[in-house]
Structure formats: C-alpha cells, structure tokens
C-alpha cells in the first residue's frame, strides 16, 4: 500500500481521491479497522461520494455476495459479519422522526453503522464515532477528511 492510502495516526486525516477507484482503495483500508458497534458519520454535499464510499465499505467487508434485509428506504441492513446498517437521513426534517423509527437501537447495537446526512439528527449519534466529510462534485477529485473517535 502506498503512503497516500495509509491511514493517519492522528485524530485528523485528509486525503485527495482522484477517482472512484481511489475511493474504493481508501474504503478497503478504512473498513478493515471497523469493529461491530462502530458508527461512521458521513457528511458532504449531494453527489460528493458518501453512498459510493458506503458501497465500497460494504463490498470490502461482505464481498460482492451481499444480503440486504428488506427495511425502510432510508435504512438498509446488510446481513453479514459484521452486520452493516446504512442509514440516510437526507429526508429527515425533525430528529424526533428518527427516534420514532427505532434508529437509536441500530446506533447502539453490534453492527457497523454508516450514516449519511447525520447532521439532520446529530443528537442521536453516539459521541464515539468516526466522522468523514467529503468535498467535491462531478468529475473533480474528492477531498476526504477523516476524524477518528479518540
Ligand atoms: N473520487 C470519487 N469518489 C466518489 N465518487 C466519485 C468520485 N469521483 C467521481 N465520483 C462520482 O460521484 C458520484 C457520487 O455519488 P454518491 O451517490 O456517492 O454521492 P452522495 O454523497 O451519496 O450524494 P447524496 O447526498 O445525494 O446521497 C458518483 O456518480 C461517483 O461515480
Ligand atoms: Mg448518498
């Protein structure tokens, strides 16, 4: 693995991803350190690559043979080891909706939880979490910033 893909030892880490393949390579390195119960909060504008990163993490942990349990449109659970919950709060206007839907249970369980648009309900996320921010759109490179839990 080259230096650009090695994860930083400090709490902050910024990386330029010149292609979707680079995003997959980052995801492969990052996903291997995720433990059941870990929460990853993803932010960045529309089309910045949050879902692409989630797909890459699922692919790394579960391979191409993924099983998706039927759930809500904004909440996909991938059965596997570890289970992965992919939650997209883009359409959530009121954080109370999230509490009613039972998302808090997922956030304190034994799955790896990946949350897009988490700032729509910031208080439901545990303080111990990874935060990843994506910047960039279209054909431009993406800037990825990772903040580690401790
Ligand atoms: N380096 C890159 N990393 C990720 N995606 C990239 C990159 N370069 C180009 N793309 C493209 O950008 C698009 C990102 O779309 P994606 O659905 O992942 O964004 P998103 O952040 O989840 O948006 P939304 O907020 O609408 O959910 C994809 O079409 C992808 O192919
Ligand atoms: Mg998305």
Image (spheres, rainbow, N blue to C red):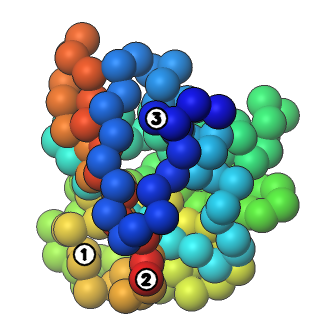
- Is the shortest distance between ligand 1 and the CB of mark 2 under 8 Å? no
Q: First in sequence: mark 1 or mark 2?
A: 1
Marks 1 and 2 in Cβ contact (< 8 Å): no
Cα separation between marks 1 and 2: 22 Å
Marks 3 and 1 in Cβ contact (< 8 Å): no
* Residue receiving disc 3: 4
The location of residue 146, given as percent across then percent down, is 36, 57
* Residue receiving disc 2: 150
Image quadrant occupied by the N terminus: top right
In this picture, residue 36 sits left or right of residue 105: right
Q: First in sequence: mark 2 or mark 3?
A: 3
* Residue receiving disc 1: 121
Mark 2 is surrounded, within 10 Å at the Cα level, by few (under 14), some (14 to 19) or many (20 or more) other residues, namely: few
Q: First in sequence: mark 3 or mark 1?
A: 3
In front: label 3 or label 1 = 3
Label 2: which secondary element: loop
- Looking at the rendering, which quadrant does residue 116 occupy? bottom left
Label 3: which secondary element: helix
């Amino acid at each position: 693995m080259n230096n650009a893909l090695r994860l930083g030892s400090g709490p902050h880490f910024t990386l330029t991803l010149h292609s979707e393949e680079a995003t997959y390579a980052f995801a492969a390195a990052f996903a291997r350190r995720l433990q059941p119960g870990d929460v990853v909060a993803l932010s960045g504008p529309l089309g910045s690559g949050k879902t692409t990163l989630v797909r890459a993490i699922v692919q790394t942990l579960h391979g191409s043979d993924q099983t998706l349990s039927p759930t809500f449109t904004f909440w996909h659970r991938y059965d596997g080891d570890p289970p992965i919950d992919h939650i997209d709060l883009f359409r959530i206007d009121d954080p109370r909706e999230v509490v009613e839907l039972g998302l808090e249970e997922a956030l304190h369980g034994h799955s790896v939880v990946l949350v897009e648009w988490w700032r729509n309900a910031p208080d439901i996320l545990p303080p111990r979490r990874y935060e990843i921010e994506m910047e960039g759109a279209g054909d431009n490179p993406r800037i990825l910033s990772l903040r580690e839990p401790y």
